[in-house]
Image (tube, grey):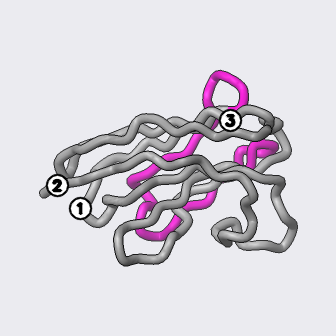
Amino acid sequence: AVQLVESGGGSVQAGESLSLSCAASGVAYKNNCMGWFRQAPGKEREGVAVILTSYGTTYYHDSVKGRFTISQGNAKNTVHLQMSNLKVEDSAMYYCVADNCLSGWSRFRLEAYKYWGQGTQVIVSS
């Protein structure tokens, strides 16, 4: 069965950095879209960053551009999200997602991803 396991969440002060990791099993490292979504209390779930594992192409939500970086790990079926200059509004549950990339679909559509991790909490305090 496909399994995605996130790690690296925690509580930090605004302006600090945090790195999240996702380890996937049962999913090919290549030919997949993998990334991160987040959901804060009272808000809709939104896409944060996605990487096309076959090409290395990345996509970012406007609110995190220049601050977050998604990358493939050295180990197979792993992705990382390096978060810098964290803001209070970045506080949310972060979910790792994966699936085959769908042609013509926005990379931030919830329906584009069949496999989801359980999430890791990120809390940013001022």
Q: Position of residue 89 (x, y in %)?
A: 29, 66
Cα separation, mark 3 vs mark 2, equals 30 Å
Residue 67 is a magenta residue: yes
From the viewer's perspective, is residue 3 above or below residue 117? above
**Closest to the observer, 73 or 38:** 38
What residue would you read off at disc 2? 125
Q: Earlier in the sequence, mark 3 or mark 2?
A: 3
Q: Is residue 21 magenta?
A: no
Please name the residue shown 81% across and 58% down the image. Answer: 101
Residue at 39% of width from left, 46% of height from top? 83
Residue 9 in which image quadrant: top left
Q: Which residues are magenta?
A: 51-77
| Residue 27 picture location, percent across and down | 79, 38
Residue drawn at x 58%, y 49% as measured from the top left: 96
Q: In the rendered picture of this protein, how many numbered marks are placed on residues?
A: 3
Residue at mark 1 to residue at mark 2: CA–CA distance: 6 Å
Toward the top, the furthest residue is: 75
Q: Would you say residue 84 is visible in this rendering?
A: yes
Residue under label 3: 24
Neighbours of disc 1 within 10 Å: few (<14), some (14-19), many (20+) = some
Local secondary structure at mark 1: helix
Q: Position of residue 111 (x, y in %)?
A: 73, 70
Residue under the image location 49 percent in, 49 percent down: 119
Q: Label 2 crowding class (10 Å Cα cut-off): few <14, some 14-19, many 20+?
A: some
Question: Along the line of sight, which residue is nearer the eye, 118 or 7?
Answer: 118
Q: Nearer the viewer, residue 75 or 115?
A: 115
